[in-house]
Image (cartoon, rainbow, N blue to C red):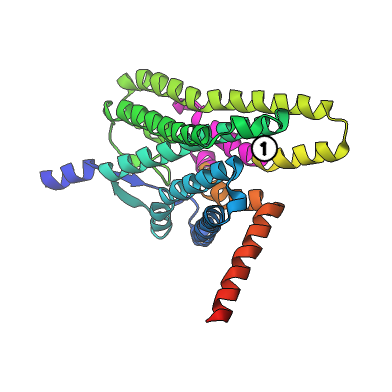
Amino acid sequence: MLANQASTEERFLLLGFSDWPSLQQVLFALVLLCYLLTLTSNSALVLLVVRDPRLHTPMYYFLCHLALVDTGFTTSVVPPLLANLRVAALWLPRSHCTAQLCASLTLGSAECVLLAVMALDRAAAVCLPLRYAGLASPGLCRALAGASWLGGLTNSVAQTALLTQRPLCAPRLLDHFICELPALLKLACSGDRDATESQMFAARVIILLLPSAVILASYGAVARAVCRMRSSGSRRRAVGTCGSHLTAVCLFYGSAVYTNLQPAQHYDQARGKFVSLFYTVVTPALNPLIYTLRNKEVKGAARRLLGSLGRGQAGQ
C-alpha cells in the first residue's frame, strides 16, 4: 500500500478538458488536424528552402529554423494532449512532466528570440537595402540562429531547475492539459511559492519582454523608413516584406504574454487552457500559411520542385 501511495505521489493527474466532456471529441479532431497540418506544412517549407537555391537567403534561413522550432514545440505538447482528450484525466509521471516542461520551454523560448532575430533581419533589409547583403552574412545568420536555440535552452534549464528545487504539495491535480509553469506553480507549497514565483517571473519577463523590445524597435525603424520612401511601390514591398512576420509575432506573443506574465495566484485555469491551446497547437499550424500564402518566391519554388518531380517520373 505504501509503495502504491509513493507511486501515486510521483505522478500528476492532468485534468485537461474534463470540465467540458462534450468538447473533448471535437477538440481531439481539431488538435489532430492542426498537428498533421503543422507537420506537413513545416516539413514542406523546410524541404523547399533546402532544395531551392533561390531561397538561400537570410529571411528563408530564419524561416526554416522557425519551422523546425514550431514542429518541435507542438510535438512536445500534442501527443499527451491527444491521450488526455481520450480519457477523463491522464496520469503523468513527474519525470515525464518535467521533460515536457523543459522541452516546451526550450522551444517556446527559442521562438521568442527567433522572432526578434527575424524582426532585426527585416529591419535591416528595409532600412539598409544597399548594405544588407554584406551585413546579413552566412556566419552572422548562423550565430543568431544558434543564439536563439541557446537562449531558449538556457531559459528552460533555469526555470526547470528553480521549479524542481521547490516542494510541491498534494493533491497533485494539475488543472491543465500540459505541464505549464503557471499551473505547476499553483501546486507549490505556500511557504515556498512566493520566492519561487518571483524568481521564475523575472526569468519569464526577460525571455518575453527583451525580444518584444527588439521587435518594437525594429518595426519602429521600419515605419520611419517607409514614411521616407517616395515610391508607393517601395512602400508596398516593404509592408509585404514585414506583414507576414508581424502577423506571426502578434499571434504568438499575444497569447504567450497572457499566459506567462500573470502571477500564479491570479491565473485563470479555464481561460488559460484555451489560450495555451491556441499558441501551442493553432499558431504553429498557421505560421507556414501566413508566410507562404502570398509569397511568390515560395510558390515559385513549389512549382519548380513539382515540375522537376514530374519530369523525373516522365523520364522513368
- Where is residue 30? Give x, y as percent: 54, 59
Please give left or right for residue 9 compared with residue 100 in the image: left
* 252 in the magenta segment: yes
- The image quarter containing residue 156 is top left
Assess disc 1: are there few (<14), some (14-19) or many (≥20) residues with their C-alpha within 10 Å of its C-alpha.
some
Residue 27 pos. (x, y %): 52, 57
Q: Is residue 299 left or right of residue 185?
A: right
Q: Is residue 80 visible?
A: yes
| 195 w.r.t. 22: above or below | above
Q: Quadrant of residue 137?
A: top right
Q: Measured from the top left, where is residue 249 in percent x and y?
A: 62, 37
What residue type is disc 1 on? Leu
Which residue lies most toward the left here? 2
Instruction: Tell which of 281 and 313 is nearer to you.
Output: 313
Q: Main secondary structure of the magenta part?
A: helix
Write down the quadrant of residue 271 in the picture.
top right
Taking 86 as reference, is 163 above or below it?
above
Residue at (34% x, 52% y) in the render? 90
The percent coordinates of residue 91 (x first, y second) are: 30, 50
Residue 174: in sight, yes or no? no
Q: Which residues are magenta?
A: 246-275
Report the residue marked by disc 1. 246
Name the residue at 52% across, 60% down: 40
In percent of the image, x 48 and y 22: which residue is there? 206
Q: How many numbered callouts? A: 1
Residue at the spot 39% in from the left edge and 19% down from the top edge: 199
The secondary element bearing badge 1 is classed as helix
Looking at the picture, tell me which residue is in the foreground, 175 or 182.
Answer: 182
